[in-house]
């Protein structure tokens, strides 16, 4: 298949593996520890597991799975707000399917739907707008979720709603921004990240500049990366090469898609409809300055948070949930106390087990579960020998 097969060629993958292994061994010897690279984006985490990249990488590289899965970082309080909106008799609540099973403090959207709430899964915000046109006696709310990747389609839908004079359509806006969370990770003292596999889809919208800024400010190599196996391997090689040559630059491996300046019409639509919030709450990571957007005053009539009363309170994660530590790369998913026991894809306790882009779901789906559970027991016994 064109644009797929050429990025999955085994011979090229073998060559890249050999080059990566040699370079990683030299750098790890210099560092006295494995090279730590973070893939920020949940799409990359999924691809890394799906194609078995982590399993066959040299032990001189440790991949840290970052917080770039919007479903995974949605805090419980916002899920509770979704449920309370969906339970209003006048509302048809519309959402992408992957948000349906994210646990709230009392229930998920799926459980609310089973109990009778009018919740419909859609494939795009335009589907939600169509529903509003077909149901003029109802208020249709679209659960807007995602990084900059999905912001243009939401913004364009609001502009379309305005052009069509639709009055019964609004957004519950939970869009989040990439650079503030990267900065918050890098400003924290807990982590030692040597370089970043930078997000491909976000960059397609925002362009290269935000990542040039991060590379310059924090002196960390960054490579904007595609989602096929050879993309990821080439990106790892490019990061290692920068580390070996003591460079910290932004490089674009995904140049076939990502333009230097990003997507101009998308950025213009976003600038019209959205503005930065002062703060936004992230599951497991706390409140981060300017890490989310809200609807501008000019489009306030499409804002569900202004249209409906909303509790908007912070709800703590369950005591055993270690999603925050996984999102910050402090532990691996299988090291969480409840991984594979009380937290599984069928009964998720944390959001990282829900989305296919969540690190825990990826380990569970593609990992060797008996082996991981055995490793977990050993890890927990070592962490608390008295138990
Ligand atoms: S296993 Fe469950 S609770 Fe633990 S970090 Fe993963 S998603 Fe969160």
Image: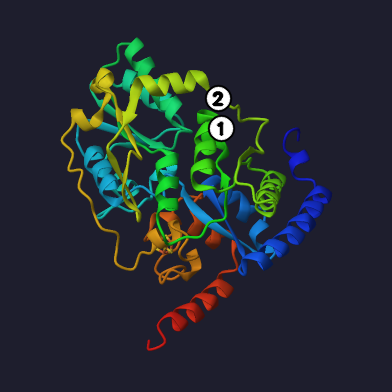
Quick one: label 2 or label 1, which is nearer the N terminus? 1
According to the picture, the residue beneath numbered tag 2 turns out to be 261
Distance Cα–Cα, label 2 vs label 1: 6 Å
**Regarding mark 1 in the picture, which secondary structure is present there?**
loop
Do the residues bearing badges 2 and 1 touch, measured as CB atoms within 8 Å?
yes
Up the image or down, 297 lies above or below 117; here it is above
Residue 79 drawn at (x, y percent): 29, 46
Find out if the beta carbon at label 2 lies less than 8 Å from the nearest ligand 1 atom: no
- Identify the residue shown where x is 41% and y is 62%: 325
Q: Residue 119 is drawn in which quadrant?
A: top left
Query: 98 and 255: which one is in front?
Result: 255
- 30 w.r.t. 199: above or below: below
Q: Can you name the residue that lies furthest to the bottom here?
A: 386
Quadrant containing ligand 1 reads bottom left
Q: Nearer the viewer, residue 203 or 371?
A: 203
- Whether residue 59 appears in this view of the structure is no
Residue 103 pos. (x, y %): 33, 53
Number of callouts: 2
- Image: 343 above or below 251: below
Provide the residue designation for mark 1. 208
């Amino acid at each position: 298949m064109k644009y797929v097969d050429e990025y999955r060629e085994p011979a090229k993958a073998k060559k890249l593996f050999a080059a990566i292994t040699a370079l990683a061994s030299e750098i790890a010897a210099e560092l006295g520890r494995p090279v730590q690279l973070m893939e920020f984006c949940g799409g990359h985490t999924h691809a890394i597991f799906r194609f078995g990249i982590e399993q066959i990488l040299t032990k001189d590289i440790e991949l840290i799975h970052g917080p770039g899965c919007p479903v995974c970082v949605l805090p419980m309080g916002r899920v509770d707000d979704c449920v309370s909106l969906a339970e209003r008799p006048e509302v048809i609540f519309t959402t992408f399917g992957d948000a349906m099973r994210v646990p709230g403090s009392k229930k998920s959207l799926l459980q609310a739907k089973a109990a009778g709430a009018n919740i419909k899964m859609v494939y795009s915000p335009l589907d939600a707008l169509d529903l509003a046109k077909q149901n003029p006696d109802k208020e249709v709310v679209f659960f807007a979720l995602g990084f900059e990747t999905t912001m243009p389609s939401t913004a364009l839908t609001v502009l379309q709603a305005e052009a069509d004079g639709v009055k019964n359509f609004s957004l519950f806006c939970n869009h989040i921004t990439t650079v503030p969370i990267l900065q918050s990770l890098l400003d924290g003292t807990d982590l030692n990240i040597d370089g970043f596999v930078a997000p491909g889809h976000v960059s397609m919208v925002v362009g290269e500049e935000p990542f040039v800024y991060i590379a310059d400010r924090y002196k960390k190599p960054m490579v904007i990366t595609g989602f096929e196996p050879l993309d990821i391997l080439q990106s790892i090689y490019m990061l290692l090469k920068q580390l070996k040559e003591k460079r910290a630059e932004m490089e674009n491996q995904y140049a076939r898609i990502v333009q230097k300046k990003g997507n101009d019409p998308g950025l213009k639509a976003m600038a019209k409809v959205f503005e930065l919030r002062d703060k936004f709450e992230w599951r497991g990571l706390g409140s981060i300055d300017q890490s989310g957007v809200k609807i501008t005053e000019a489009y306030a009539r499409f804002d569900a948070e202004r249209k409906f009363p909303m509790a908007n309170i912070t709800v703590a994660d369950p005591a055993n949930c270690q999603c925050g530590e996984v999102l910050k790369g402090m532990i691996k998913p299988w090291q969480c106390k409840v991984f594979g026991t009380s937290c599984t894809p069928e009964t998720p306790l944390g959001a990282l087990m829900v989305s296919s882009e969540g690190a825990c779901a990826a380990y569970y789906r593609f990992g060797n579960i008996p082996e991981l559970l055995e490793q977990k027991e050993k890890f927990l016994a070592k962490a608390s020998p008295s138990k």
